[in-house]
Image (cartoon, helix red, strand yellow):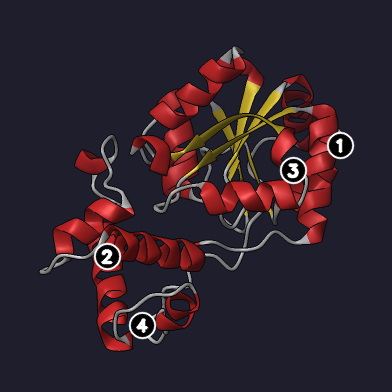
Amino acid sequence: MNKMSDSVISGILSRKKALLLDMNSTFMFGEDRFGSDEDYSVYYKSIGGKLSDETLNTIMQDILQYLGKLYPKEEYRNHFPSVAQALDNTLSFKLSTEEVDKIVQTFSYHEHGYIPEEYIKALFQLRERYILSVVIDIWAPKTRWLETFKKHGIDTLFSAQSFSSDHGIVKPSPRPFEMVVEQLDIDKEDCLVVGDSIRRDLGGAIAANIDCVLVGGSMDDRALAAYEDLLVFCDYANNS
């Protein structure tokens, strides 16, 4: 954990009313399958894509490099481009609307991960004690993620949501956290950010003046505490 005593942290957690949860590497895993050897054409062809394998794979890598270059830059935090905009900005020829949609779907498929059963159980356990919300950075439209939430029955657990692909604002901008707090209509002092990224989750929480705990192995003295993963945090919070 950090320099605070267990009793102090326990007392803080017992007073919190709402959690602002990150998603990737917090309760969803295996995301961002964008390795240099990834063959994007497999999924793309399965949904009826017509471009050659080589062309499609080049397009996908161009989108990834374009967005990846902009993601850390402060000047793009409040107007981060969509996958479709990245495609338009990197493509040297015109595509039909149908093909653009298939490329966006392919990007979404590779950006999306899976939620282990034990993490689904942990979310339900945390919901018994806290109001839950999510502050999520994704580059593709949120449709696939909402379908996954519904499939696992966790869609009703979240009282507020922020998906960066909805509004183009990415962490560590404080604005996504503030938007969720506004949706919850709750004081910041009653909220706790839970995420794995020091730069995005802790940095955004600090900018928004909201307490944060880290999970997934990240550690920083500015966080209230650090836990091995969300499961450990859940056990600790439930026993506080």
- Quarter of the figure with residue 8: top right
- Residue 130 at what x, y percent from top left? 76, 27
Pointer 3: what residue?
154
Q: CA distance from mark 1 to mark 3?
A: 19 Å
* Residue plotted at (32% across, 55% down): 83
- Quarter of the figure with residue 158: top right
Mark 3 / mark 4, whichever is N-terminal? 4
Instruction: Mark 3 vs mark 4: give the one in front.
Output: 3
Pointer 1: what residue?
238
Asked whether residue 209 appears in the rendered view, the answer is no
> Mark 1 falls on what kind of element?
helix
* Residue plotted at (61% across, 13% down): 186
Q: CA distance from mark 2 to mark 3?
A: 31 Å
Q: CA distance from mark 4 to mark 2?
A: 13 Å
User: Dot 4, crowdedness within 10 Å: few (<14), some or many (≥20)?
Assistant: few
Q: Is residue 184 above or below residue 41?
A: above
User: Could you say which disc has been placed on residue 63 in the image?
Assistant: 2
Please name the amino acid that badge 1 sits on. Asn
> Mark 2 falls on what kind of element?
helix
- Quarter of the figure with residue 24: bottom right
Q: CA distance from mark 3 to mark 4?
A: 33 Å
* Residue plotted at (45% across, 46% down): 137
Q: CA distance from mark 1 to mark 2?
A: 42 Å
Instruction: Mark 1 vs mark 3: give the one in front.
Output: 3
* Residue plotted at (78% across, 31% down): 10
**Label 1 with label 3: CB-CB less than 8 Å:** no
